[in-house]
Structures are given as C-alpha cells and as structure tokens.
Image (tube, rainbow, N blue to C red):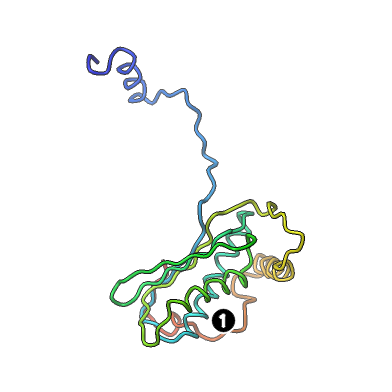
C-alpha cells in the first residue's frame, strides 16, 4: 500500500474484490461484419472467386440487415497458397446492406489483385465503418430495388429455411462443395 498510497491501495483492493462503481456498457455494437472461407483446394479461376465472393457478400448483407446497420466500407481479404495475405478496401459513396453492391465492390477490389495462375487459399468479405440503417441522407437510393428483393429473400428464408432462394450463379456447386476438405472460418 505504501507504493500506491492509501487511495490507490484502497482502489486496487476494491477492484480485486469486484467492487467498482463504474457502470458496465454491454451494448457496444459490432465494428465490422464479415465472412471468410478457407478452401480445401486452391482457386485459380476468376469466375470461381467471383462466385465465392457473391456467396460471402450474401452472408455479410444478411447479417448487416439483421443488425440494422449498413457498411460504409467494403473490405476484401485474399490469402494465396504461399500464405501471403492481402487486404484491400473501398469506401462507398453511400452506406449499403445490399449483397449486390457489396459483391460488385469486392469483385472490383479482387480484379485489381488478380493475376492469372495465382492460387488462392482463402478469401473473405467484410463490411466496415458501420452506421445505423436509417442514417442515409441520400435523396435517391440506388440500392432500394435490390434491398427490397433481398429483404423478401430474407423473409422467405426465415420461413422456409436457408438455401431455398439464392442467386442462380450459386445454384452450381461452389468450389468448396466440389472439394470435400473445404473449411469455413
């Protein structure tokens, strides 16, 4: 107690016994929402990567809508076979919770990184800089028609289960479905 003084010593004693007058704030929201997948076999084809980005963008968008937030930034994570990991992000003009927008941005970010023959081990999509869903001040919402469609799909999924409705490009077997040892993170 001599090192801390009477006040500091008493404070440390109280904290050690679980006594703390400060309030606990348990309602801290998420900072980002994302999904990534590690493949059992490396991806090399751009179309396979784009399809996987769509699947991940769909998951991210559903979670954004459930949390009633929108992402101002879309981030892409790519890990190659040699474990080199690159991340790229882009801030949107208006925040979004729409898979089509998130996918488009993620594919554009990937196209900058893509080199034929690169072997991809892991890919991820993340929405960052989250804002409340009603926070947009835009006069016109380009995402509105797609948001309506996606919220309808959310309602159908809630009623009939996951996978009942999905984009046609995801009906084909995904690379992870073709590779029996794929692992999702």
Q: Where residue 54 sits in the image (x, y, percent)? A: 55, 75
Q: Residues within 10 Å of mark 1 (few under 14, many from 20)?
A: some
Task: Find the residue positioned furthest to the top.
Answer: 6
Residue 91, percent from left and from top: 55, 62
The image quarter containing residue 101 is bottom right
Determine the residue located farthest toward the right in the rendered image. Answer: 139
What residue is shown at x 23% (from left), y 18% (from top)? 3
Q: Quadrant of residue 153?
A: bottom right
Q: Quadrant of residue 12?
A: top left
Question: Please, is residue 38 above or below residue 22 in the view?
Answer: below
Q: 28 or 88, which is in the foreground? A: 88
Residue at 58% in and 60% down: 63
In percent of width and height, residue 19 lies at 41, 23
What residue is shown at x 34% (from left), y 14% (from top)?
Answer: 7
In this view, 101 is above or below 30: below
**Quarter the C terminus occupies:** bottom left
Image quadrant holding the N terminus, namely: top left
Q: Is residue 57 left or right of residue 143?
A: left
- Residue matched to label 1: 170
* Element assignment for label 1: helix
In this view, 82 is above or below 16: below
Count of picture labels: 1
Task: List x then y, in percent, for residue 159.
Answer: 68, 66
Question: Residue at 44% of width from left, 87% of height from top?
Answer: 45
């Amino acid at each position: 107690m001599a090192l801390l003084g009477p006040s500091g010593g008493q404070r440390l004693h109280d904290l050690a016994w679980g006594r703390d007058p400060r309030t606990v704030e348990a309602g801290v929201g998420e900072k980002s929402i994302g999904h990534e997948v590690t493949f059992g076999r490396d991806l090399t084809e751009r179309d396979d990567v784009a399809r996987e980005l769509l699947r991940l963008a769909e998951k991210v968008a559903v979670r954004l809508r459930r949390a009633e937030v929108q992402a101002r930034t879309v981030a892409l994570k790519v890990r190659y076979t040699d474990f080199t990991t690159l991340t790229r992000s882009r801030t949107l003009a208006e925040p979004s919770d729409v898979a089509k927008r998130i996918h488009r941005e993620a594919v554009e970010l990937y196209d900058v990184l893509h080199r034929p023959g690169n072997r991809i081990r892991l890919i991820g999509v993340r929405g960052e800089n989250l804002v409340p869903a009603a926070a947009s001040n835009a006069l016109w919402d380009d995402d509105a028609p797609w948001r309506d469609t996606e919220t309808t799909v959310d309602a159908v999924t809630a009623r009939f289960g996951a996978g009942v409705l999905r984009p046609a490009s995801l009906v084909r077997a995904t690379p992870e479905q073709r590779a029996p040892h794929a692992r999702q993170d």
